[in-house]
Amino acid sequence: EIVLTQSPGTLSLSPGERATLSCRASQSLSSSYLAWYQQKPGQAPRLLMYAASNRATGIPDRFTGSGSGTDFTLTISRLEPEDFAVYYCQQYAGSSWTFGQGTRVDMK
Amino acid sequence: EVQLVESGGGLVQPGGSLRLSCAASGLTVRSNYMSWVRQAPGKGLEWVSVIYSGGSPYYADSVKGRFTISRHISKNTLYLQMNNLKPEDTAVYYCARVASVEEGYFDYWGQGSLVTVSS
């Protein structure tokens, strides 16, 4: 089973700052199989990025996904107040899925 | 507009059973890969089960042999039968659609149904 490790656990930033979130896989995976989600308290997760670098419908271009192999990154270029949330990466390995443990982006 | 609406959650004793439902509109359960994902209180997301469009089910090791995923075609509804429940099964259970068979990401999610396993 591929394990996804996200870092840091918590990121404390101010609106307008840049956020860089990391997702490291325990073994190499196709970038086609890496997605990112945003979750706010009391809400279901929301798809942000799929196939590592493709923004989902309606996702603003301040969100960028990149990476390959075992190292993937989600970058938020300038944090807006609505971006403070928990972010999860997820991989698909044919009939099974795993998520990272999440990175919380808090307002400083 | 796609909507997934879960129901059936509640409080159950350890060893008990519960069946969750996920009523879909705006998409056809039969034609999609449909999945259950859960989230224990204050914890991260954990994939639980998937049913392929052809009907094949798959499960996480943590629930294999205890949970059964199924669907009702005419009701356009997804189910999760949960037997021999354990306290560690306490979580919000989300149903979600696998958007792409080739890329395996979840694009539509329900609002979740809380299952609490406690005596």
Image: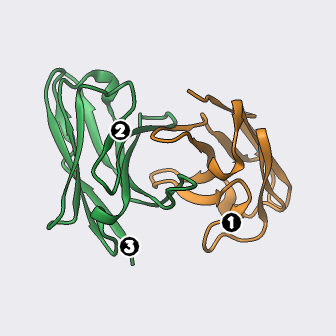
- Judge whether B39 appears above or below B6 on screen: above
- Indicate which disc residue B2 carries: 3
Rendered shade, chain A: orange
- Indicate which disc residue A101 carries: none
Viewer-proximal residue, B44 or A91? A91
The subunit carrying tag 3 is B
Mark 3 and mark 2 lie on one chain; the one further toward the N terminus is 3
Residue displayed at 23% across by 27% down: B66
Residue displayed at 29% across by 63% down: B29
Q: Residue A65 appears in which quarter of the rendering?
A: bottom right
Viewer-proximal residue, B49 or A79? B49
Q: Amino acid at mark 3?
A: Val
Instruction: Provide the letter of the chain coloured green.
Output: B
- Judge whether A106 appears above or below B15 on screen: below
- In this orientation, does residue A71 appear? no
Percent across and percent down for residue B90 are 32, 31
Q: Amino acid at mark 1?
A: Arg
Q: Label 3, label 2: how many angstroms apart (C-alpha)?
A: 24 Å
- Judge whether B62 appears above or below A74 on screen: above
For mark 2, what is the residue? B58
